[in-house]
Image (cartoon, rainbow, N blue to C red):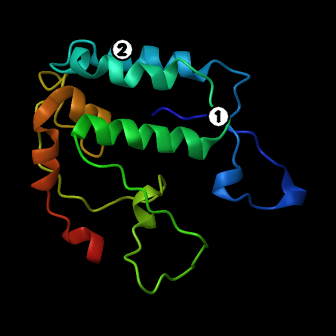
Amino acid sequence: MLSIPIQHVGGNQGRQKYKDVLVDNSYPWQRQHWRTLQTAYRTSPFFEFYEDDIAPLYKQEHESLLAFNLQTIAMVCECLQIEMPEKKTSKFELEPMELKDFRKMVNAKRLIKLKQEPYAQVFDDRHNFVKNTSVLDLLFNEGTNALSYLKQQNLDFLYD
């Protein structure tokens, strides 16, 4: 689990808007994250193939968590050879009427009932398939087959 440290605003200000969350760069988290990814995936079949695309995310400081996440999504889209979604919401809606609400997908504390098909991972000789990992795990292990793999997944759980 790789966590990005953020600057907390304190109790008096209440909750922050996501766009206002600032990254705490007083600790070299980028260096630690990059070394962790190198250690975990250096021996994976496609690490070197994507390394030059992914490394820049961890070579610079990022002020905003949103900016870092959008840059990461853009990089993943590029690696998967799909277009980066450009459309953004303009206001918060508790219960969106005209859109499918997939916000539950990004809640780290909630278990998702994804029936994920196994693929070859770096340590399968010692461990069973580890599901619900990062898209980086999929890219480093499946490479150019990653998008095909994603398209084959059953997404029925999204509509429960």
Q: What residue sits 58% from the left and 21% below the top?
A: 60
**Can you say which quadrant of the picture contains the N terminus?**
top left
Q: What residue sits 36% from the left and 14% below the top?
A: 38
Residue 45 can be seen in this image: yes
Q: Amino acid at mark 2?
A: Gln
Left or right: residue 147 versus residue 10 is left
As drawn, 82 above or below 2: below
As drawn, 157 above or below 80: below
Quadrant of residue 26 within the rendered picture: top right
Q: What residue sits 67% from the left and 36% below the top?
A: 23
Residue 3 locus on image (x, y percent): 54, 35
Find disc 1 in the rendering and name its residue. 5
Residue 36 locus on image (x, y percent): 42, 18
Q: What residue sits 50% from the left and 63% below the top?
A: 88
Residue 17 locus on image (x, y percent): 69, 59
Left or right: residue 99 versus residue 7 is left
Find disc 2 in the rendering and name its residue. 38
How many discs appear? 2
Residue 134 can be seen in this image: no
The residue lying toward the viewer, choosing from 8 and 87, is 87
> Disc 2, disc 1: CB below 8 Å?
no
Q: Which mark is residue 16?
A: none
